[in-house]
Image (cartoon, helix red, strand yellow):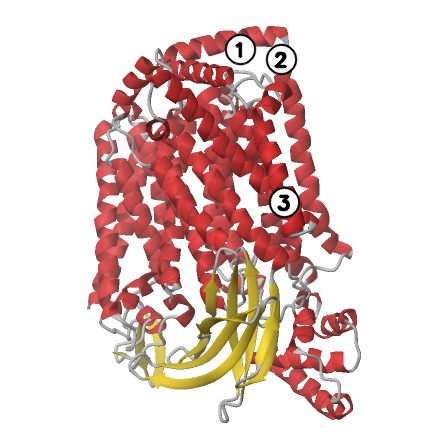
Amino acid sequence: MKHKKLKFIFILAFLLTIISTQFAYAQDDVPTDDEVNEVAKGLYCPVCENTPLDVCPTEACKQWRDVIRTQLAEGKTKEEIEQYFVDYYGDRVLAEPPRTGLNWLVYILPPAVILLGAVLLFKNFQAWTKPKVAESVSNQERSDVLSSSKGDSSSANKYISQLEEELKKRN
Amino acid sequence: MLAEFGYGVLVLSFIVTIYSGVAAVFGVRKKSASLIESARRAQLLSFPLISISSLALIYLLVNNHFEVTFVYEVTSLSMPTYLKITAWWGGQAGSMLFWSWLLAAFTSLVTLRKWDRDIEFLPWVIVVSAITLAFFLFMIVFYENPFSRYWLVAGNVVESMFKPTIEAIIFTPENGRGLNPLLRHPGMIIHPPMLYLGFVAYVIPFAFAIAALITGRTDDRWTRITRRWSLWAWLFLSFGLVLGGRWAYDVLGWGGYWGWDPVEIAAFMPWLTGTAFLHSVMIQEKRGMLKQWNMVLIILTYALVIFGTFLTRSGVLSSVHSFANSPIGPYFMGFVSFTLIASVYLLIRRWNDLRSETEMKSALSREALFLLNNLLFISILVVCFWGVIYPLISELVTGFKVTVGPPYYERAAGPLFAGLLFLMAVAPFSAWGHSTLQTLGKAIWKSTLASFILTVILFFTYTQNLYAIIGFFLVALAIFATLHEFWRGTIARQKTQNENFFTALSKLMMRNRRRYGGYIIHISMALMAIGILGIELFQKETQGTVAAGESLNVGDYTVEYRELASWDVPSDDVNYTRAVVDIYENGIYLGQLYPRIDYFYDAEQTMTIPGQRSTFRDDLYILLVDWQPVSNAGATFKIYVNPLVNWLWIGSLLFLFGIIFAAWPEKETEKEKVRVAKSVTQTSAAD
């Protein structure tokens, strides 16, 4: 972990020297904080877990925002700056994994599972709403047996249908 | 001395808990009532034992015993006593003790109930809670011991429970590190216990479900016994989530309440299955259907509770490798897998006994719509679960971490939540058993018309954003439809009972707490949706550095920087830096706000406290980002305008009221049944 941090600081220092040498050329058109934040919003720093760069209060993130500012001043676009950060720190700086390779799973799996659930539910609906005759008889028996053992709940059921009826009439 | 005592009692409680589980199993096997009774008493003993151990820890915390590692990590001399007490759940080891204490308390409450005709559940309820409790106590006793201390061995400080060598002497640091300042906020003091209460309370319905599976008593007895438990569990979990959101809004300084952070999602996932369970269990009670599904839901909820604790406690989120190195991670993983496999095995064994007693008659019946609701909740769960898990999978497979952030969740969850709002509007009007499009349409057209008119007005006066328009329409529909439901129930009762409107309304609600409490919750959810739509779709922000006398503009607001002061408060060990800004709306002076940065010396951490002005229309939320320390010449502010966000908090309050209303104990149930049976002949309303 410490090793990582050191590496990170080194890279930062390196970047800062590049920035400071280039800063002189870019000074006349300094991007506003809002322009910087607009780019920073979509980036996640690898030091602080799950905090977008535009609101991260740490010193490291402040320096990152300065990197963005410099690059904006150089005329780079949002995409170019994002790519720059990806090249240095990996895909984890992006708010979402890029749509490549294994990462497609992120985007495909949930809709697939949900669709499967919906299909299963729909099939069951069909099965439920069109019960086979023989089965429905045995089920009738079953429910008769069961309802005799649960007096209170079946009376509550009657009660409910009565209320529903009542409410329907009054509507 | 006290540390050893506390630890000793803890070990004792661990042994007693194991005994209660084992005795219960043997009691059933040998059909020995006395052995089961012994198990019950052992279970009851675990609570006072863990309480004594916790008291010992609290004593150490309050009295600055920094030789105890845990005390050193979470308290410092400058902290007030109440914070030292709440530091109990402010760190890993303490919070696990707190978890165990709550579980022992809840299990004891259940054990003390009148069992009468449910006596066959008792031993298995004891077994399930004993296994859970024993697992947590095992972790505390062997890996996360809050009583472990610092020792000086040959000039080095080492951590150990007992004297590591003969020459070792206790090492006492002069001051502790202090509780993370972010956790010193009132919201954060209540937030974790609320979440834990919710988490732990779900163990009880799960224990009964497992007892039902083992004993084969698969009728709806277990859901009836645990109905109120799951409602209270849901109450605490919801309250915990809301408090967490409010805390984030007030303290974290990013102008929001929810960031789709894995830690948040860890607490949100059991809430999703818990909410689905609350709905689908009603179908089982009314129609004898979905018994298998309810079992699945309660098992999932329990697994997600443990999984959520695991996610937040094992360090797995920061990296798979830190998880593997953490002493407790693999055990947690093992425990989640064990309970899940065992529960699923039991469920499959009883699968056929859990068949529905009745058939689904119509795809528009209330039970069908409830099923759709369940599908939506589970879909959100799938999205959340996968979003939390995928970065770990990616790290394992490719070696690289990725971030799955808010855009992923928002894109997926947005339409699903919209679907839930729609169901909220429609479902109350569908009847149990059978509904047609015609009956539904007839019931809901008035609300639809009213919502449509309101949306058209909003379109011309407030926003043309398509998402907002759809969202506001659904919110309006849910609120109008629910109010209409109150209305028609009251009118029906008014006519049959000859009561005036308010008597009729209050009696209707009091006699059907769960139903009308549920409707209040629906309305509150719709209100919360207004706040979420507002902040998600219309949030404005700006940031800039200004000198005294200069101003920043955002929306209709102008924020003018006046002055800034920075001072130390030695008694609190904190430095405060406070800016004063004047705020104007369209040129009209509104007053002053004081955004602040607090620096905590003991924890070496800052905390950003926003200056806030809150109205029903929007919140002005100003953060002090930076300042020039010497000259006081300039300061950097970040300013958010968060439209409608107050409705989120208003909705939350109504939400709490709704759940408490629904969960409030009714009069003696037996009497109630007689009364219900009698009143069928009259016509009032039903649960």
Crowding around mark 1 (Cα neighbors within 10 Å: few <14, some 14 to 19, many 20+) is: some
In percent of the image, x 33 and y 55: which residue is there?
Answer: B98
Tell which circle, 1 or 2, labels the residue nearer the N-terminal end: 2
Q: Which residue is mark 3?
A: B457
- Of residues B667 and B337, the one drawn nearer to the viewer in this rendering: B667
- The percent coordinates of residue A28 (x first, y second) are 75, 89
Residue located 57% across and 61% down the image: B320
Q: Is residue B478 visible?
A: yes
Q: Which mark is residue A131?
A: 2
The amino acid on which the numbered mark 3 sits, given as a three-letter code, is Ile
Question: Where is residue B428 shown, x and y percent of the image?
Answer: 51, 28
Is the residue B128 above or below the residue B414 in the image? above
Q: Nearer the viewer, residue B294 or B473?
A: B473
Kind of residue sitting beneath label 2 = Pro
Left or right: residue A45 versus residue B252 is: right
Q: Is residue B40 above or below residue A32?
A: above
Q: CA distance from mark 1 to mark 3?
A: 52 Å
Q: Secondary structure at mark 3?
A: helix
Name the foreground residue: A4 vs B297: B297
Same chain shared by disc 2 and disc 3: no
Co-location on one chain, circles 1 and 3: no
Mark number displayed over residue A139: 1
Picture coordinates of residue A1 (x, y %)? 56, 74
Residue at point 49%, 7% (across, down): A141
- Amino acid carrying mark 1 in the image: Asn
Real-space Cα separation, disc 1 to disc 2, in angstroms? 10 Å
Q: Nearer the viewer, mark 1 or mark 3?
A: 3
